[in-house]
Amino acid sequence: MSNSITYVAMDTHKKGHNVALHYPGQEEIVRFTVKNTAREITKMTRKIIKQAPGEVEFCYEAGVCGFVLKRRIEAHGCKCAVIAPSLIPCKPGDRIKTDRRDALKLLTMFKAGLLTEVHAPDKQQEAARELTRCRQSAHENLKRVRHQLLKFLTRHGYLYSEGSHWTLKHLKWLRSLEFEEALLADVFDNYFTQMQHCLQRLDSLDKQVKKLAKSKPYNKVVGLLCCFHGIDTLSAVTIITEIFDFGRFSSPSELMSYLGLTCSEFSSGEKQKRGPITRAGNKRVRRILVEAAWHYRHPCNVSKALRKRRNGQPQWAIDIADRAGQRFRKRYRHLTNCGKMSCKVTVAIARELAGFIWSVFKEYQARKSVKQAA
């Protein structure tokens, strides 16, 4: 029964948590703080279970504590929901914010069922996601170091004008530079050494991502996604590790909304006003889909690289990818001829690409279920 459930809400922080607790049949709200250690969390959970007359349900906002706190609580047989912070209702007139108030507000809305739960990955899924995010951070660090190196050279009059940057010819030119001041030479060596370290780190992470893509839980679904134009191994692995279970989306529109690719709207009465995309949800997958959508401004010919990626993949997945390519190319040309900006057209293509990816995973799960039943 819902009236016998003990509700616990936590406002979490790195060092400690503010807890608001309500036992069924009591009017008083119990409040206390607990340190963010495995021992203290275990003691708190056991004490609440001992005093509770029935089930115990915990909740906290997704944030700095990740999903470890959820696993520590659920290890004792309790339910724990991780709440999406961006979807928590907020009163415009409420101008006072404290940790105690946040815990009480979370508890009140949790009891009323007004909170949206985040889909929590398991340990293996979270580890795979951390690998792809680490690779993205390494790539961003490399771009930052390269930018700093080029600006340093520009400040001191060293400009490369014989082609593109970061080619073998450009690297040879960098190694041939000489500086009159010894300190400038030391600074250049530091920048260049840091750039080489970033390159080695990025290469090592790329190998780990490819190894992950060939592992048993990912090899089949990665191959299916690689049938699309503009999606290679790294993009496919990132999409899978960020979303995991495509079955939790009942329709393609739900996946599009989750990725923040749907248009925002502020309509009232007879007035209808639609704005740019919401940019809510998972920004990493949204970025990859937009990057992949740029490929559809060109004719969707089956290149040598795409033919290699499709080798050994089921024909039904290739057919879906070909239908997507033909549709996106026509739509890109149509919207461009209507005067739409290319960036807006690309986002529209990315939104539909998310729908086709959802259909591929839905078909894969259906065929897998039939095969298991047989």
Image (spheres, helix red, strand yellow):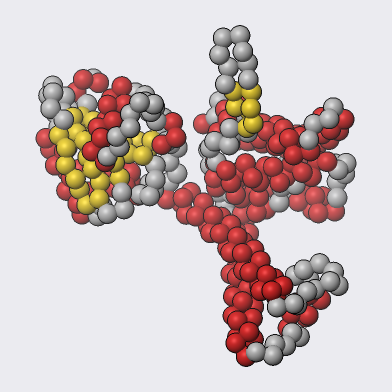
Q: Is residue 308 left or right of residue 365?
A: right
At x 85% / y 53%, what residue is drawn?
304
**Residue 104: horizontal and vertical position, in percent?**
24, 32
Determine the image quadrant of residue 159.
bottom right
Q: Nearer the viewer, residue 374 or 28?
A: 28
At x 75% / y 47%, what residue is drawn?
230
- Position above or below: 163 against 31: below
Q: Is residue 295 left or right of residue 240?
A: right
At x 45% / y 44%, what residue is drawn?
121
- Position above or below: 124 against 102: below
Q: Quadrant of the N terminus?
A: top left
Q: Quadrant of the C terminus?
A: top right
**Residue 219: horizontal and vertical position, in percent?**
62, 50
Q: Is residue 219 left or right of residue 174?
A: left
**Residue 228: horizontal and vertical position, in percent?**
75, 42
Asked whether residue 286 appears in the rendered view, the answer is: yes
Determine the image quadrant of residue 175.
bottom right
